[in-house]
Image (tube, grey):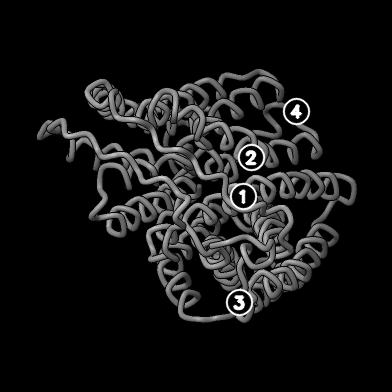
Amino acid sequence: MSDEEVQILNRPQAARTASQQPLPAPATTPQPAWLGPVLLVGIVLAALNLRPAITSLGALFEETREGLGMSGTVAGLITSVPALCFAVFGVTAPRLSRRFGPAAVVCAGMAAVAAGLLIRPFATNAAGFLAASALTLAGIALTNVLLPVIVKRWFPDRVGTMTGLYSMALAAGTSLAAAATVPMTQALGGSWRTGLLVWGFLALAAVLPWLAIGAAARKEKAAASGVPAARPDAGPGVMRSRTAWALACYFGLQATGAYITMGWLPQIFRDAGVSASTAGVLLAVTMVMGVPLAFVIPGLAGRMKNQGPIAVGLGLFGLVGYLGLYFAPAGGAWAWALLLGVSNCAFPLVITMIGLRAKSPAGVVKLSAFAQSTGYLISIPGPLLIGTLYQHTGGWDLPLALMAGLLVPQIALGVLAGRDRTIEDECGMRD
């Protein structure tokens, strides 16, 4: 479940069927007075740490590649690892949550993020750097899935407010790391290792509140141990739905564009003559566009029966942005960064469509798991292919043509996924 998906799940859905089991009564154990404020701090700190591992590396990618002797292909593999980890480790989050509790898993996730970020600057080769990055990304994947669960569990009457809060914190962490990494590195002596290491201390700070939250959650779980667990609903067979496949492929292509942007956009600008610090700020501009649009797009899409026109509009913004990078990367750098930032807001659109393409909450969860896990797997080859093309052609003409070309099927899939229909109807399932 993604960061913004809880907004969709919280919307009124079709009535539950008679066959669905009711949720168990919540535990009546009184919560300590300190838990609410500590949860607030913990959620914000966790969200701040969900993207700096990726965008800080993007800002120092050239220095890191040279320092570790990475080829373009290996560098492309590094930019593909986030999608792979999100697909693989995100799937394990529900099972781990059922066994240990969501708070404990988020605590472990933040510890993994901190450990990976503190270890990887000391790597002496690409393999060690990749392993440490994978550890960090595994922790991010678990936290990505479970933060919405935490919000719904402890703030059931303030889901929208809390979701907006941590969504803004996530965007702030993303853009802060992109903009501040290069100047902070220069201020600390100029070593890329120091510039990456700093973000490990922010992640370490996020572990502390979750230790206390996890302890409180264990006590509450022990007090509620006699409450029977709800029987999970299997949900519809989404793999038989053409709309589900359209959503999964659309999710995969938008994720491909997002990770190529985070991993390679600063390098594109730097190769065009833009300074390293300005290239980091340009990436921050692209990322920060998601803050206001993440609130606007879901509301607009929810009022429309067909969301295809929004998918077309976002795709066209991306096409113009890539064409600009092809013809005048430095001259119109700020405009291209803004346009690509708008195009990357296909993420909140696809999350909204997931919520609209199923009739029941159980159907939404089933569809979301399928679309996101399949989509992240689809997105894995993209950054690797871009790195390989960049290495073998020595420039960005062919990679940029490929990026623009991928937007064509993305637009077509968005139109298919945006049609007013549900997976239950397509699969012949009851509501």
Measure how far apart labels 2 and 4 are at the Cα level: 28 Å
- How far apart marks 2 and 3 lie (CA) works out to 28 Å
Observer able to see residue 270: no
* Residue 63 position within the rendered picture, expressed as x and y whole percent measured from the top left: 64, 36
Q: Nearer the viewer, mark 3 or mark 1?
A: 3
Image position, residue 201 (x, y; %): 38, 28
Residue placed under numbered mark 3 in the picture = 420
Q: Which mark is residue 250?
A: none
- Local SS, label 4: loop
The amino acid sitting under disc 2 is: Ala
Q: Residues within 10 Å of mark 2 (few under 14, many from 20)?
A: many
Nearer-N-terminus badge (2/3)? 2
Of mark 4 and mark 1, the one earlier in the sequence is 4
The label nearer to you, 4 versus 1, is 1
Amino acid residing under circle 3: Asp
What is the x, y in percent for residue 68? 70, 26
Of residue 346 and residue 336, the one placed in the foreground of this image is 346
Residue to which mark 2 is pinned: 87
Residue under label 4:
69
Q: Give the number of the mark in front: 2 or 3.
A: 3
Q: Are marks 2 and 1 in contact (CB under 8 Å)?
A: yes
Give the crowd class for mark 3: few <14, some 14-19, many >=20 residues within 10 Å.
Answer: some
